[in-house]
Amino acid sequence: MSILRPVGSLIPVSSVPNLRDAGGYPAGAGATVRRGVLYRSTDLGAVTDTDAVALDDLGITTVFDLRTVAEREVRPDRIPTGAKEVSLDVLADRDPSAAPAMMLKLLEDPKLAEEALGGSEASEHLLSSYREFVSLPSAVAAYRSLYTDLARGADAPALIHCTTGKDRTGWGVAALLLLLGVDEETVFTEYLLTNEHLLPALAPVFDRFRDAGGNPDILLPILGVRREYLATAIDEMSTTFGDIESYFTRGLGLEAEDVNALRERLLSRD
């Protein structure tokens, strides 16, 4: 059962950092994004017995996993009791060196991280990834399936996640909120909450990286989020399709009925 918390606040499940409700935001014309229907988080690969109970209490019935096959093999999810898992590999068509897909390797190997992320390359990796969230064929297929499932009756509440719950998940949630009518600035605010909710939980990761001889500062671009990342995806979407509605219909191929169903399921006008 969902507990009413301040909009955008962290749900305190320590082994699943960056867990929060994507609802509660005003969507115009007196509507609000429903709460307790759609959650977002990091992967569920380290869920403890105690936290498994906390996740069960949210009533999650569908988990959408946006990670690569390799990521899922390294850290398989421990999904809530009775939930089904839907694997949607956003980056299947991308080079395995894509920053989001190789996150775990970079964290374990300071030398590799320095080579891949030194200078401004980290930001460039992420900017390229965000453009591809809009245009990469595997991303188009993954997000189409995600939104179609949500529209056509995937049991709610649902959870969307990737590895750190900020990039592939960040675009997936941001695009949906824009479609629902949440204003762009509020969408940016929701997206940037990851810096408040995730980075403190990753302090041990930074410490281990430092102890292994790495400079933890080079991890900030890939473990946190920046406004420019999401802005790049929005610009790619606007340039290619014109507006968010066209992105869902022409870009992802959703039927008009599916778009209407998403709004019906995820908006409240009470």
Image: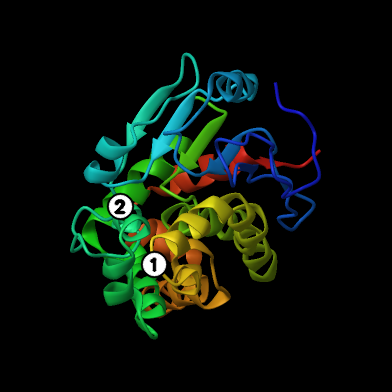
Of 211 and 222, nearer the camera is 211
The image position of residue 179, as x and y in percent, is 55, 57
Q: Residue furthest top?
A: 82
Of 20 and 179, nearer the camera is 20
Q: Horizontal placement of 112 versus 146: left or right?
A: left
The residue indicated by pointer 2 is 90
Residue at 68% across / 44% down in the picture?
23
The residue indicated by pointer 1 is 213
Q: How far apart are marks 2 and 1 (CA)?
A: 32 Å
Of 216 and 133, nearer the camera is 216
Q: In which quarter of the image is the C terminus?
A: top right
Q: Horizontal placement of 90 versus 59: left or right?
A: left
The image position of residue 256, as x and y in percent, is 44, 49
Q: Horizontal placement of 91 versus 82: left or right?
A: left
Residue at 60% across / 21% down in the picture?
59
The secondary structure type at the circle numbered 1 is loop
Give the mark toward the camera: 2 or 1.
1
Q: Quadrant of the N terminus?
A: top right
The secondary structure type at the circle numbered 2 is loop
Residue at 59% across / 25% down in the picture?
51
